[in-house]
Image (cartoon, rainbow, N blue to C red):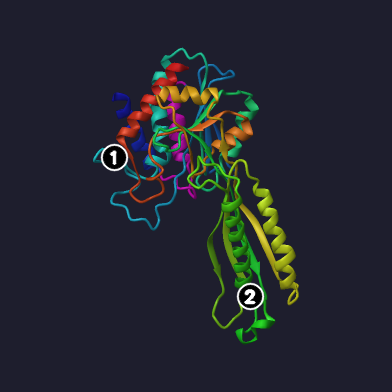
Amino acid sequence: MQSEKKAIELLKILVSFDTTSFKSNLDLIKFIEDYLDKHQIKSELIYDETKSKANLFATIGQNKTGGIILSGHTDVVPVKNQTWNTDPFILTQKDQKLFGRGSSDMKGFIALVLSRIETIKKLNLSKPIHLAFSYDEEIGCVGVHSLLEEIEKKSLKPELCIVGEPTSMEVVIGHKGKYAYEVKVNGFSCHSGQAPYGVNAINYASKLINFIEKLSNEKSINGPFDEDYEIPYTTLHTGTIKGGTILNIVPNLCEFDFEIRYLDKDDPKILMDKIINYSENTLLKDMHNISKKTNIELNEKINYPGLEIDSKNTEVIKIKDILKNSKHKKVIFGTEGGLFKKKLNIPTIVCGPGSIDQAHKSNEYIDIEQMIKGGEFLDKLIKNI
C-alpha cells in the first residue's frame, strides 16, 4: 500500500495540471522530466511546432533492443458544460474513489508508472523499460506521431508496448480504426420564393448524409464481421451539422462532420471512394446544372488505424499470465496502440486501471481498488523483466 500511497500523491499532482487538449501540457511534462531527473533518468522531449506541447520519451536500464514500452497520453478532454460536484483539477477522495479530470483517462496509469521508478532503478534489469508519454491523443492521436518517429530512429525494437488506457485491468487486443471528415456543401443562394433557381446546400448535404447512412446499413448486413466487438461491423455516423441563415433565403452553405469506425479486416478507403464518387458524379453534376459555382469539399480531420493482435501472441499470453486472467476483449474506443503496432511493428496491447465508463464524463473518477490492481500488475511485470 505504500507504493499506492505514493501513486495517489503523484496522481494528485498530475490532475492539478489542466492539460485539456487545446491547452499546453508543458507544465506536466516538465514535472515528469524533473521527477525522472531526480532518479538519474534522462528524458527526451519532442516538441510540437509551436513549442507549447511536448511528448516525453525515457529509457530505464541499458539502451539496447528488447524490453517494453509503457505508453500513456497526458492530455484530457474539456470540462466545459459539465456539472462537477468537486473541482475537476483537484483530486478528491470519497468512498474509495478518486475524483478528478484525467484520473481514469489516463493519469492514473502514468502516476502508477512514476511511483515504481525507485523500484525499477534498484533492479538489475536484463532489458530496458521505455516510457512514452504523448500529447493530443484526445483529438485524434495527433501528437504521438513525432514520438513514434523518434523511437523508430533509435532502432530499439521493443518486444511489447502496453498502452495504459482504462480497461479495468483487462487485456485489450483490438479496437477499430477511425476516419473523420468535415464536409462543406457550397450551394447557390436566392430568395426562397425562387427556390428552384437556387442550389439548397442543406438539401444536398442531406442527400450525402443519407448516402452515408445507406453505406452504414449495408455494412450491418453484409459485414465483414468480428464478433469480439460489441458492434461487430464497420459503422458510419454523422455527428454534427449546421447551415442556413433565415427561412426565406435558400442556404448557400451547409457543413457537417462524419466518421467511419472500421474493422481491421475492412478497408475504409473503399467506403471513402464511394462517398467521393457519389458527391462528384451524382450530387455535383445535379448542382452544376444550376450553378457552376457550387461545390462539395471533404476534408480529413482524424485518421488513425485500428489495433489487432493475435490472442495467441507470446507477449499477450505473458501479460495474461501476470494478470492471472486468460480472457481478452476488443473495445469501442480508439487508442494510440494501433499506431505503435502499425508504425513500429511492435506487439501492442491496451491494459490499464480505471474504467472507460467513467472517462470523459463529469465527476470522472478511478477506484482506489483499480490503482492497487494496476500497481500489483506493474510490480509483477517489472520483476519479469
Residue drawn at (54%, 79%) of the image = 246
- Disc sitting over residue 114 in the figure: none
The reply to whether the magenta stretch includes residue 91 is no
Q: Which residues are magenta?
A: 18-40
Across and down, in percent, residue 123 comes to 43, 14
Query: What is the residue that sits farthest to the bottom in this orientation?
Result: 193
State the SS at label 1: strand
Locate the N terminus and report the quarter of the image it occupies.
top left
Give neighbour class at mark 2: few <14, some 14-19, many 20+ (Cα, 10 Å). Answer: many
Q: In front: 274, or 50?
A: 274
Residue that mark 1 sits on? 97
Regarding residue 47, the answer to whether it shows in the image is no
As measured in the structure, the alpha-carbon distance from the residue carrying label 1 to the one carrying label 2 is: 52 Å
Q: Is residue 73 visible?
A: yes
Write the residue at 36% across / 42% down: 16
Residue type indicated by callout 1:
Lys
Could you tell whether 333 is left or right of 273 in the image? left
Secondary structure at badge 2 equals: loop
> From what the image shows, is residue 164 above or below residue 39?
below
- In the rendered view, would you say 109 is above or below 119? below
Against 104, residue 83 (above or below) is below
Quarter assignment of residue 118: top left
Disc 2: which residue: 200
Name the residue furthest front. Answer: 221
In the image shown, does 345 or 363 lie closer to the viewer? 345
Residue 232 position in % (x across, y down): 53, 45
Left or right: residue 35 compared with residue 6? right
Farthest residue in the left direction?
95
Q: Looking at the rendering, which quadrant does residue 83 occupy? A: bottom left
Residue 20 inside the magenta-drawn segment: yes
